[in-house]
Amino acid sequence: MGRRTRERAWSQATQLVRGGTERSHHGETSEALYLTSGYVYDSAAQGNARTADEEAGYVYGRFGNPTLTMFEDRLALIEGADACQATATGMAAVFASLMSQLRAGDHVVASRVMFGACYVVIDQLLPRYGIETDLVDGTDLDAWERALRPETRCIFLESPGNPTMPVVDIAAVSALAHGVGARVVVDNVLGMPTVQRPLALGADIVVYSTTKHIDGQGRCLGGAILGSDAYFADDLVPFIRTTGPVMSPFNAWVMLKGLETLELRTARMCETAERLAAFLEGHPAVDAVHYPGLASHPQHALAARQMSRGGSVIAFDLAGGWDAAFRFLDALELIDISNNLGDSKSLATQPASTTHQKIGADARALLGIGDGLVRFSVGLEAEADLRADLEYALAAAGG
């Protein structure tokens, strides 16, 4: 039994700590950090063979790096993917996952609720290249079916969707997409690899902003694309090698350290989020709470089938709109105002003024992003302290 076969048999907790590790001749305990942009060859013939992909080995930093390889192998292992490509940012992963496989005349269908920058990519950037796009209510299977065409090449969705947390039936949408020969790309940032596994549900490609839960401590930018060997060989690798949106070795090393504690951190975050969501749902200053772990969530039963926990992000509507959201955020003392998420520190933001500002008021209204919506990323602080901070800020919001 080879080592990689044994790694696949390990539990996820073990894979997160040890998967993909390759020690140098020095026998280091921690993964080595290879800060190099290029590589030397034993001979001109070896340089020729490696460049022609006739001999295994590294050629140039844009093509690969030992530290990146360890991170990519580990993430592919826990995701159940053939291969992984680490990218410089999460948006680099989203854009490359799409543009590597699309051509002018192709058609893309996407779930309407998504991160603001993803919305701009689908709604504004892809059409510049002659790619038609349609946005649908991701929770409506009939809407997906109506939007699909023979020329539909790709489906893109977030589940849960950022920021209002709708849950898409990944298995059902994947079946519909495969019926017309389209690939399904799932942005699993809010699902997290410890909570949801889109490939096992029928998706073809998974993307992450590793900046979020995988780093988990607000240190480095990064992204990842995971999928089949065929997709990598035919589409993604040629695109990445030419355009170069690769992760730096240092960031990959940081991400490796983040993976070691990912299961522990996300379990604590989800546990706290589940209880705080219930608290918020009962508060008079809150009009509605959007959290898949609550029985009141419209897709709660679906979320329970395809997610092991409710996630670490809660969205909620404040009755007083824009002014109430600002009063709430400004009154927070423990929770930081930030448009990031997945951090060990709890963070909150008003999507209308930050993450989804640039898509405009009309688009926000269509997505259900009201001026009083707050997105709350639960961190690792004590639940009692977070609850006290929320109570204080909610009292200020009601003023």
Image: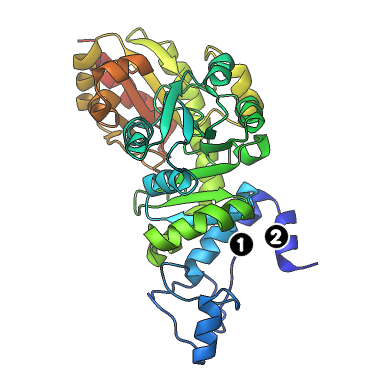
> In which quadrant of the rendered image does the C terminus lie?
top left
Q: What element carries label 1?
A: helix
State the residue at coordinates (44%, 63%).
241
Q: Is mark 2 on a helix, strand or loop?
A: helix
Residue at mark 2 to residue at mark 1: CA–CA distance: 8 Å
Work out whether residue 399 can be spotted. Answer: yes
For residue 20, above or below residue 317: below
* Numbered mark located on residue 380 in the image: none
Left or right relative to 142: residue 216: left
Q: Residue 7 carries which label?
A: 2
Residue 132 or 156: which is nearer the viewer?
132
Q: Are marks 2 and 1 in contact (CB under 8 Å)?
A: yes
User: Measured along the vertical axis of the image, is residue 232 above or below residue 274?
Assistant: below
Give the residue type that dot 1 points to: Arg
As shown in the figure, which amino acid type bears the numbered disc 2? Glu
Looking at the rendered structure, the number of numbered marks drawn on it comes to: 2
Residue 18 is tagged as 1
Query: Residue 265, how many percent across, how many down?
Result: 50, 44
Identity of the residue drawn at 38% across and 49% down: 92
* Name of the residue lying farthest toward the front: 105
Q: Where is residue 85 in the image (x, y as percent from the top left)?
A: 50, 56
Work out which residue is located at the far bottom of the displayed protein and give it: 43
The residue under the point 56% across, 81% down is 49
Residue 379 at what x, y percent from top left? Answer: 41, 38
Quadrant in the picture for the N terminus: bottom right
Residue at point 52%, 48% (across, down): 262
Within the image, what quadrant is residue 309 found in?
top right
Q: Earlier in the sequence, mark 2 or mark 1?
A: 2
Mark 2, mark 1: which one is toward the viewer? 2
